[in-house]
Image (spheres, rainbow, N blue to C red):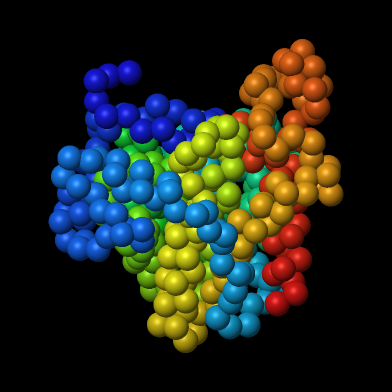
Amino acid sequence: MSHSQAFMSLDARGPMQLEDTRVDAPRLAEFSKNTQFPISTGGQCGTGGGYAAHTAISNIPLAQAGPLSKQTSKFDWSSTNAVIAFGDSYTYVQGTQGRQNFSFIGDQFDFAYDTETLLSNKIVQNQTGTAEGGPNWIEYLTDCGVKDGLTSPKSCEKQLWDFAFAGADISTEYIPLHHNYTLSLENQITQFTQYGHPALQKNKQTTNPKETLVAIWIGINDISDSAKYPVPSFQEFYKTLTKSLFASVESLYDLGYRKYLFMNLPPLDRTPGNQADINPSPNATQVAWYNQALETQADAFGAGHGDVEVRVFDAHSRLAAMLDGPARYGIVNTTGFCVGYDQPDIEVEYLKYGCPVPLEEYFWFNSGHLTSHVHRVLAEELEGWLKSK
């Protein structure tokens, strides 16, 4: 670790010490200067109190985080031929043309690709093929890439083209990259507009963007990375972050995509580390504020485009219900994780690593990611919800 500023956050295989040495620092000073509003408690970040805003927010009664899942128009899951995904390690899948443990295809240094490279790419499913030790929610939802080994998205009934990058935040405008090769959500979409979309126009099942669902789950790293930033108002900061998100989504709209699914934040205040901390970071109020900002921006996006179908799925409430009533879902442990989660024989030799139950009976895969079992349950609930609308 160098002497430079470090941030704790998540990449594909768990938390990492992240150094702000290779990218421009976020424009927090400009944000603070131009944002003249106190945080909700009436407290305000002073010139000498870098963590004053966080200290004040920790004293707020914890809110119920997560808006109701909602839509702006009719949504027909059955007519969806393919899913294009963007996000972070909760959504990333390993590809044969991707950066190991980070992406399906390319990175910030390997930005360009041609049609053949994308369309011949395959999803890798093994213990390290996702950040969950097995299939994740988007693979379960599409039933694409779930089986061990290699899967061509073109072979799936609902094709999955996943451009999420593990460790991604929304934009480097306010939060620095985890690594100099990380693709932020903003750059995932930029890369897609330049190379992914033209390539998918040559794939029979994705030639019509109106029959393709755009799925985005982002913000997990953003709220964790920025939880102690000296901003005068986290509510306004989250509004700024989500506005940045939807500014990028406008590029997808311009390409003809009209069906959008957004996932709100999970209960990050209840990670193993946060459950053991009297001052969780982020806390439930911060998560609630971010989720509210996401819903507001999704509503505005839908209202501004009369021809789009927009949904926000309340992943937070579903996951909180699993934490509150784990037995119903076959879960035994909700407060910790198996320390041997990344060992090659963990599936059968969990006792050797001091873990009393198999991984699928844990809620948390590691200090910040959900187990593949939890992703499967979440995907089942999401699919049922999509079919019911």
Which residue is at the front of the view, 271 or 199?
271
Classify 2 as above or below 177. Answer: above
Q: Quadrant of residue 247?
A: bottom left
Quadrant of the rendering where the C terminus is positioned: bottom right
Q: Relative to residue 126, is residue 266 drawn left or right? A: left
Classify 22 as above or below 211. Answer: above
Quadrant of the rendering where the N terminus is positioned: top left
Which residue is at the front of the view, 79 or 39?
39
Q: Position of residue 187 (x, y in %)?
A: 35, 51
Classify 359 as above or below 258. Answer: above
Which residue is at the front of the view, 147 or 221?
221
In percent of the image, x 20 and y 54: which residue is there? 32
Q: Residue furthest bottom?
A: 306
Q: Relative to residue 317, is residue 120 drawn left or right? A: left
Q: Position of residue 218 (x, y in %)?
A: 48, 53
In percent of the image, x 36 and y 33: which residue is there? 7
Q: Quadrant of residue 264?
A: bottom right
**Can residue 362 be seen in this snapshot?**
yes
Q: Position of residue 179 (x, y in %)?
A: 35, 33
Q: Position of residue 206 (x, y in %)?
A: 57, 65
In percent of the image, x 27 and y 29: which residue is there? 5
Q: Quadrant of residue 332?
A: top right
**Can residue 368 be seen in this snapshot?**
no
